[in-house]
Image (cartoon, rainbow, N blue to C red):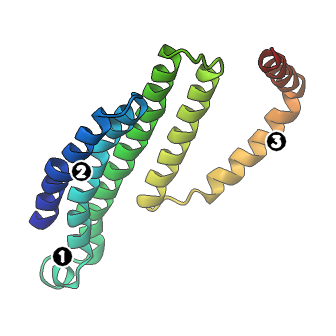
């Protein structure tokens, strides 16, 4: 466990700070945003990988606790923190990247739509992964969501058609 925290510290000090020096030499700000946003999830993942690995070793299950207890105390919380850290950071990469693009000469008109779709996709993916990590079966939820989506699709058919027609007109200009 301690080794993973040492490796995480070395990655933070050596690799990420070295990359930061290289990134400062580029002309765009997008690589700065990506490096700054993904710095903590990389360090957190490396650090918590040691905790997860500890909970999976036979020595831990033979001497300390049974596998289910180790998973509940160490493995699942560590994996949950990793999932939340990556979801939040990937969300921030896109949000801050869109801000950089919007502030530059190029104007990206669909940025708010893309941002909302990305936020929804990241939230759904993170929630699905968290439920799976904690042993909650998501297949019935996906089936119910599919049936509800079909019903809502038939009910809102004209509204959705108008929305996509408006987007087509908007991007046609």
Q: Is residue 102 above or below residue 137?
A: above
How many numbered circles does the render carry? 3
Q: Which residue is label 2 attached to?
A: 43
Q: Nearer the viewer, residue 99 or 104?
A: 104
Q: Which residue is label 3 attached to?
A: 150
Which quadrant of the structure image shows residue 21? Answer: top left
Q: Give the spatial CA distance, label 1 vs label 3.
A: 47 Å
Q: Who's the residue at 29% across and 51% down the image?
A: 42
Q: Dot 2: few (<14), some (14–19), or many (≥20) neighbours within 10 Å?
A: many
Q: Earlier in the sequence, mark 2 or mark 1?
A: 2
Q: Give the spatial CA distance, label 2 vs label 3.
A: 42 Å
Q: Nearer the viewer, mark 2 or mark 3?
A: 2
Q: Who's the residue at 41% across and 32% down the image?
A: 92
Quadrant of image for the N terminus:
bottom left
Q: Is residue 66 above or below residue 163?
A: below
Q: Give the spatial CA distance, label 2 vs label 1.
A: 28 Å
* x then y, percent, for residue 7: 16, 61
Q: Which residue is label 1 attached to?
A: 65
Q: Nearer the viewer, residue 101 or 123?
A: 101
């Amino acid at each position: 466990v301690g080794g993973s925290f040492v490796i995480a510290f070395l990655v933070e000090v050596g690799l990420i700070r070295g990359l930061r020096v290289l990134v400062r030499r580029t002309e765009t700000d997008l690589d700065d945003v990506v490096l700054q946003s993904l710095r903590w999830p990389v360090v957190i993942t490396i650090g918590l990988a040691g905790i997860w690995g500890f909970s999976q070793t036979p020595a831990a299950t033979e001497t300390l606790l049974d596998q289910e207890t180790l998973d509940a105390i160490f493995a699942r919380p560590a994996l949950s923190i990793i999932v939340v850290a990556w979801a939040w950071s990937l969300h921030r990469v896109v949000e801050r990247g869109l801000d950089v693009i919007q502030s530059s000469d190029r104007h990206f008109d669909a940025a708010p739509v893309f941002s909302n779709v990305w936020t929804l996709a990241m939230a759904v993916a993170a929630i699905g992964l968290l439920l799976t990590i904690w042993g909650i079966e998501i297949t019935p939820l996906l089936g119910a969501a599919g049936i509800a989506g079909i019903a809502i699709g038939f009910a809102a058919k004209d509204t959705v058609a108008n929305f996509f027609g408006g987007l087509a007109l908007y991007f046609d200009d």
